[in-house]
Amino acid sequence: MKIEVHLSQFKKMISLSEKIAKKNMTLPVLSCLLFEVGKNNLNIKATNLDVGVEVMIPAKSDTEGVIAVPAQTISAFVSQLNDQDGIVKMELVSGNLHLSSARSKVIIKTVPAEDFPTIPRVTEGQKTTISSEALIKGLKSVWYSASISSVKPELSSVYMYKNGDYVVFAATDSFRLAEKKVKVDHSVAFDDILIPLKNISDIIRVLEDIGGDIDMSSNKNLISFEGQDVYLASRIIDGTFPDYKQIVPKGYATEAITLKQDVINALKVSNVFTDKFNQVKFIVDPKEGYFEIQTKNADIGENATKVDSALTGERIEINFNGKYIADCFQSIDADSVSFQLGGMNKPMVIRPASGDGTFMYLVMPMNR
Amino acid sequence: MPMNDFSQIWQTALIEIKGMVSPANYSTWLSTTKIIRESEGVIHLGVPNEFTKEWLAKKCHNSILKILRQINGNVRALEYVIIKDGERKEGSSKKTISSPTIAMPLQDFYINKEDNLNPRYTFENFIIGPFNELAHAASQTVIKNPGQTYNPFFIYGSPGRGKTHLIQAIGNEIKRQHPNKKVFYLTSEKFGSDLLNSFQENKTQQFKEKYRKYDTMIIDDVQFFSGKEKFQEELFHLFNTFHDTGRQLIFSSDRHPNVIPGLEDRIRGRFNMGMTVDIPEPDHESRTAIVRSKSRMHNISLTDEIVEFLSSEIEDNIREIEGIVNVIACQVQLKNRDLNLNEIKYLLKNSAKPKKNISVKEVVKIVSDFYTIDEDSIYNKTRRKEVVKPRQVAMYILREDFNISFPSIGEKMGGRDHTTVIHSYEKIKEDIKTNTLLAQEISQLRTML
């Protein structure tokens, strides 16, 4: 069997699918890419049984067939090739794949392909068309808030649902919560979806590659994203996300509005002096007119930084995990940020102080 | 071999299957499977994901089926079901993450999407006392034979007496005891807004079908249907469909159907067709039990004195009891020690009874209107019997509910001595204990304030 493909396309698709194929001790074929060779195209498949991806590139071939190639090996070779307009030639000779480009040549041992699983399709599900930019924006704005512990699968997920003209993304590890609304075409329709956190990075990478509008289908157990030449299927969690809106405070007792960059800088300094729990103390005193961030570490020293801000409400002194606060600024496009505090032991809400207000972040305080 | 011994059947089958596939395939695809259920010869095999489902269906469906048939001749077909993570990892120990950051109380906000019920409301945490044992007993009958004995089942009582808890617990219990019955809970407000949406989108037919597929419908707070004819009409049709086909309906309201204003007679009549029970004001023992149970839930210990104080102080509303125990729990956590009675009294003053600011004059007006006497006569020196009682009641309410000092009550009620006020207060306080009519009048007055 002889195959010819364009290097640039081949390289891109190998790197896209290679990251999904992981070392699997029980089923070695899962660490391979599956090449399905057709007359005019080459399908590359990879899966870790949680996410599956299929890409298609044009190819010239003399016969049809199926080969499983260790993903790391072929990726290491192909990623080194630099000849942008070049052609890669492949030939299967008695179980070995011979690859050659303009200058180099390798022989890779292949693996029996019959154990490679089928990448599932969404059956009996809803199908909708949605812009990949909207999905990427939404997922990236919240996914860092999801729980990394797998004790509660619904919390180690990103929750996605349609509300009016918006798709709402939410994630929480029960200590902080991020919510982002992304405006979409009103024809977009789907039932609530919980995407496992560990699949999000693969999904974002594939969506970035597809670009433009994509077809999204989902049923109770599976979600798929499909573009022109790329298909990705991910397991989804069949569960319920908590009705988090009940936790979001309706009002606040104290508010501080500051420049985002000022707080980021202040937190960077305080970060040096935090204890092992990343404890930072916020002192907001509207009467005296200051907002101060303090940290203290018995072994290193202490720090107090005042942040210029517009203040209203009552005086408050409250502790947070500084990491949780620092996390959210990546999702705030606006220059100024509003910190809304409800009182001791009550959550703090962080919102962009200007702009469209489609992002909301909630952090729980520390006990002492 | 009996069909109901699933795990045995599957273990036997797996031994044979093991010989047919490679060890790698066995541990990847088969080791995490189990038989979920069997109905009429169809075996439902639980698998962890779509990949496994596809692989099994494609590669060894026929051989698995053959093996199962050899073990049990009744097996006709094999289907694959994807099971949730939680169901597979049975008994996996729950790790509690110790973090100095306070966790959000998310566990309180899980609502099952399919039936809208909050799984937190169960009979295990429902406290039964003399005041609600009738409602509880009737609920058990409904659960035993949904749709048969009491249909509809109508529960009424003032806010905060546990109506929602009870009707949701009925729903959860029906689901548990009759797994094939579809239960759905919603508030009358949700019913209304769904109906409005269906009007706007011209989808009334879908609206009708949506609710008619359930076997038990629970509608909370039906008093909000008052005066809404369109909603009532839709409810009427829904009611008939349910009732005619022997499916259970459960309603709750803050008052008896006969006294809900703006209700069409045909709806009123239908509400009264089955069983109508009242949840009255909780008695003292029940309140004590509730305070104890709530404090146990928060892991705080309260002395008998405090429990006694709380249960005598908050009379009407269980939700209020829950609220004040929450506040105490929060303070205990903050101060890291138990609270004494005085601190709790202080807390209660601040949180439990947020009183409206109301002037003495207004109270007097309401009281005199209630007893249909002239407002001025209260301030006068007259000692006519029909005036004395309202005057004393007014003083009592001013003192008991608004904590106004005796001298200032006296001064504002026509320059009376504070001892007169004390006497009146004590007298009414004593009389309430024996005179139920008077107690009723005062509680009615309180609702008017």
Image (spheres, grey):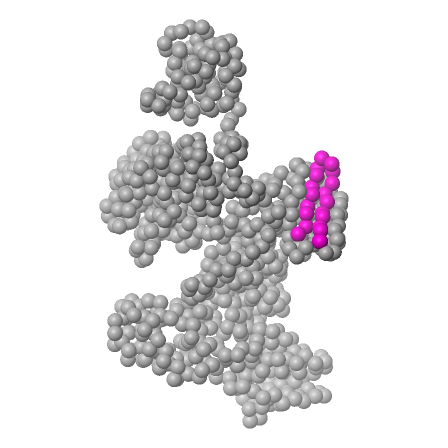
Q: Determine the residue positioned at 39% across, 17% down.
A: B427
> Is B292 situated above or below B9?
above
Task: Report the predominant secondary structure element of the magenta stretch.
Answer: strand
Locate the N terminus of chain B by quadrant. bottom left
Examine the rendering and report whether any part of residue A158 can be seen: no
Is B184 contained in the magenta span?
A: no
Q: Position of residue B9 (x, y in %)?
A: 31, 74
Q: Position of residue A163 (x, y in %)?
A: 52, 51
Along the line of sight, the residue nearer the viewer: B10 or A368: A368
Q: Position of residue B143 (x, y in %)?
A: 29, 49
Q: Position of residue B400 (x, y in %)?
A: 46, 23
Numbered range of the magenta stretch: A279-298
Is A285 contained in the magenta span?
A: yes
Taking the view exactly as shown, the residue that stands out farthest to the top is B382
> Is B134 situated above or below A28?
above
Number of residue marks: 0
Q: Determine the residue positioned at 37% across, 11% down.
A: B386
- Quadrant housing residue B258: top left
Q: Determine the residue positioned at 57% across, 76% down.
A: A22
Residue B9 located left or right of residue A313: left
- Quadrant housing residue B89: bottom left
